[in-house]
Amino acid sequence: MINVSIPDNSPIKLEAFRNRLETFDDIKGVSFSLGAPMSDNKFGTGMYLTDKGESDRYSIRLKLADAGYKDVYGLELLEGRWFLESDEKLANLKGAERQWSYVLNEEAVRTLGFSSPKDIIGKNITIGFNDISGSVIGVVKDFHTESLQHGLESVVLLPFNYFFDAGIKISTTNAAATIKNIEQAWQEQFPEYLFQYSFLDDYVGRLYREEERMFGLFEIFAGIAIFIGCLGLYGLASFMAQQKQKRLQFEKP
């Protein structure tokens, strides 16, 4: 998986970029979103069941994703359906014609008080992204938005065109040439910007390396604390020994 920064989320440019990428045999899938399932690009906001009202509001992670997101990133659909291109179009209309649809993860379903994913299909929820209400059309299996050291979060996915990341699934047989082709397609649409990409597994590995470094620092500081504590105990023991020795000398006839 390669992630490429997109400097302009114009639907015309994104579609042209996608069409160009799909002409290359080594590219297996393309998805536009605000970021990969595990990435720094995510909104924190609130959600509640529309019928219950805002008094039962819960914190969520909001991810903006297109119709290809599930297949490109390998999300597992448990109930209902994933976004269609028609859902994207309805979500990006103007005014009263706009219609929202949501896909939730299992944790979000549990947070809203439902024991089974099928029970939430068709329910209306409202999220804090301008307090917009829409219908739940699907539920996906839980996935981590951060490293495995962190707990699962409630996630709501929405097909709204605020896309600044392209997730590109490629064949590894000739990765260098494939990246060159991606850069060429990218420059055709965004010639005035610098091409930047990263491998998703490198990002995930970096998360764990950072945690390993943090754990190493904790070990160092813990060692220092133990050393200081030992010095204190040694000083106290020496002081008590000296006091005892003085008492013994004073008590001698």
Image (cartoon, rainbow, N blue to C red):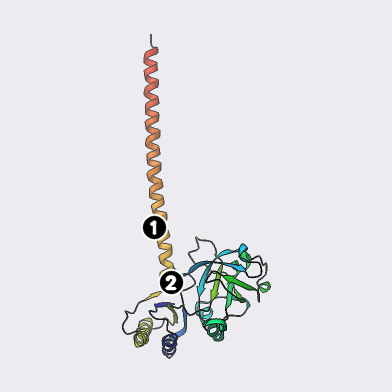
Give the residue type that dot 1 points to.
Arg
**Toward which corner of the image does residue 137 lie, by quadrant?**
bottom right
Q: Is residue 141 visible?
A: no
User: Which label was assigned to residue 213?
Assistant: 1
Closer to the camera, 252 or 115?
115
Tag on residue 63? none
Kind of residue at badge 2: Asp
Q: Nearer the viewer, residue 69 or 161?
A: 161
Q: Let me know if residue 158 appears in the view.
A: yes
Residue of label 2: 201
For residue 151, above or below residue 29:
above
Residue 138 found in image quarter: bottom right
Residue found at the far front of this picture: 95
Element type where label 2 sits in the image: helix
The answer to whether 91 appears left or right of 203 in the picture is right
Q: Residue at x 54, y 74 (%)?
A: 157
Location of the C terminus (image quadrant): top left
Instruction: Give SS at disc 1.
Output: helix
Quarter placement of the N terminus: bottom left
45 to the left or right of 175: right
Q: Earlier in the sequence, mark 1 or mark 2?
A: 2
Q: Looking at this view, is 240 or 58 the one in front?
A: 58
**Residue drawn at point x = 42 percent, y = 55 percent:** 215
**x, y percentage for residue 209?**
40, 62
Residue 171 locus on image (x, y percent): 43, 82
Q: Is residue 197 left or right of residue 39?
A: left
The local crowd at label 1, few if under 14, some if 14 to 19, many if 20 or more residues have their Cα within 10 Å, is few
How many numbered circles are shown? 2
Measure how far apart labels 1 and 2 are at the Cα level.
18 Å
Q: Position of residue 246 (x, y in %)?
A: 36, 18
Q: Determine the residue positioned at 38% across, 33% down.
A: 234
